[in-house]
Amino acid sequence: MKKMLILLSHQLNDDQLKDLASLGFDPVFMTDDQKKVWGQIQPDTLVDSVNGILAGHSFDDVLVQGHFGAVGHVLKTVGFDHCWYAHSVRTSVDSIQADGSVVKTAVFKHAGFFKY
């Protein structure tokens, strides 16, 4: 199977892992330290941070979402043909509270992986 580096700030669920396998990919996950870096990309160290994460792994393709500049750098570095994103369908309900505030509840359902 091919390897897909997962550059996301959240965990993949079982449906997503099954979908990756159906596409012929085994996931490759960032280390805990790399996840911290990916979750808080700083503009002044963006290129070095992203390059460091990419260099730390062997992969064929990348599942990438997050900081706009970091995603752009991954797309330029790895190439659009090897970059994917996750799509989900969101159902959202607003509940107006007695004090006039609003509680928003959102449910996300995985709807597939797509190339950029």
Image: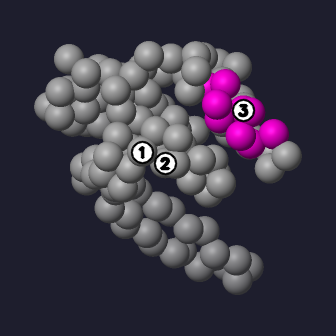
Please report the residue visible at 56 percent of the width from the left and 68 percent of the height from the top.
104
Magenta segment, which residues? 45-53
Please report the residue visible at 38 percent of the width from the left and 63 percent of the height from the top.
90
- Three-letter amino acid code at disc 3? Ser
Secondary structure of the residue carrying numbered label 2: helix
Disc ID at residue 79: 1
- Three-letter amino acid code at disc 1? Gly
Residue wearing tag 2: 75
Disc ID at residue 49: 3
Q: CA distance from mark 2 to mark 3?
A: 15 Å
Residue 54 belongs to magenta span: no
Crowding at label 3, few (<14), some or many (≥20) Cα neighbours within 10 Å? Answer: some
Please report the residue visible at 46 percent of the width from the left and 61 percent of the height from the top.
106
**From where the camera sits, is residue 66 visible?**
no
Crowding at label 2, few (<14), some or many (≥20) Cα neighbours within 10 Å? Answer: some
Residue 5 is situated, as x and y percent measured from the top left of the image, at 43, 27
Q: Main secondary structure of the magenta part?
A: helix
Q: CA distance from mark 1 to mark 2?
A: 5 Å
Q: Earlier in the sequence, mark 3 or mark 1?
A: 3
The image quarter in which residue 88 lies: bottom left
Secondary structure of the residue carrying numbered label 3: helix
Q: Nearer the viewer, mark 3 or mark 1?
A: 1
The image quarter in which residue 63 lies: top left
Q: CA distance from mark 3 to mark 1?
A: 18 Å
